[in-house]
Amino acid sequence: MDETDPRRPPEPVDPFEPTGPPDEVLARRVGRDGRILDWQAAPSPDGEWELSLEFSPSPAGQLIPTKLTIEVGYQYRWNEPPEGGITARLLHALRIGELVDAFRAEYEGALAGEELLFGRHQRIPHAPPPEGNRRPPKGWGEAFYQDVAVSYVRAMRTDPRRPIQRMAQDHPGYTAANVRDWVSKARFLGYLTPSSRGRAAGAATRKLVAALEARGQRPSPATPGPS
């Protein structure tokens, strides 16, 4: 039978044959406060969002984030959205750099798995996106953010109106935006008290003092008592 004959039965499909390139979308469940939720976790009682970050190739052939979608999570598709809807606090809590890094890891892992299983890629893959976050000078450990919290408290004493800029002077090569992200993470980890809207504020917490003592460090006079 001629291969172009429409009556020719289709060729059997190999279920293990790769059907396409790795997904170029990162999907995550997100809590009302911007925390990333595990896919297997129970539905959040406060409601949740479903986030998708799409990547497209740049003219240079490197994947870059081009579209961000936030919608009511699949568990709540027919219910009311989380109270307040999409807020500035939610958007601020979403660390795009961390999401880009997560996609990069998944994309490279998918390519490696495809090559391991099939010995080839279906097509030449695009270059993964550049790292979204520049590593802090001392890494990602808890001790780094404890030190950031201490530095912030001291900066609040010496320059209460511009503590971030004061800290940036001690980290050449990093911007005030980098330092601000570190301080936000230190606050999120519970080492600094909350700040008021639009004003620099924050003091050492009991958690920070306990962590310093566990490291064999006593809070200095420049570190206020725990809150």
Image (cartoon, helix red, strand yellow):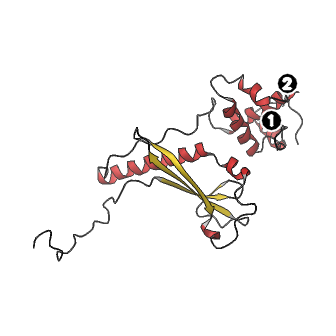
In depth, the one of 204 and 173 nearer the eye is 173
Estimate the x, y position of residue 150 in percent, counting from the top left: 79, 32
What x and y, as percent, mark residue 91? 68, 50
Q: Position of residue 28 (x, y in %)?
A: 58, 57
Neighbor class of circle 2 (other Cα within 10 Å; few <14, some 14-19, many 20+) is: few
Which of the 4 image quadrants contains residue 193? top right
Q: How far is disc 1 from disc 2 in space, using C-alphas?
A: 24 Å
Position of residue 204 in the picture relative to residue 108 (left or right): right
Mark positioned earlier in the residue sequence (1 or 2) = 2
Which quadrant does the C terminus fall into? top right
Quadrant for the N terminus in the image: bottom left
Q: Nearer the viewer, mark 1 or mark 2?
A: 2
Determine the residue positioned at 71% across, 58% down.
Answer: 32
Q: Nearer the viewer, residue 7 or 121?
A: 7
> Disc 2 residue type?
Thr
Q: Nearer the viewer, residue 53 or 146?
A: 53
* x 59%, y 34%: residue: 135
Q: Position of residue 127 (x, y in %)?
A: 41, 41
> Does residue 71 appear left or right of residue 123 in this picture?
right
Which secondary structure, mark 2?
helix
Q: Residues within 10 Å of mark 1 (few under 14, many from 20)?
A: few
Q: Quadrant of residue 187?
A: top right
- Label 1: state its secondary structure: helix
Hey, which quadrant is residue 202 in on the image?
A: top right
Residue matched to label 1: 213
Q: Residue at x 75, y 27 (%)?
A: 165
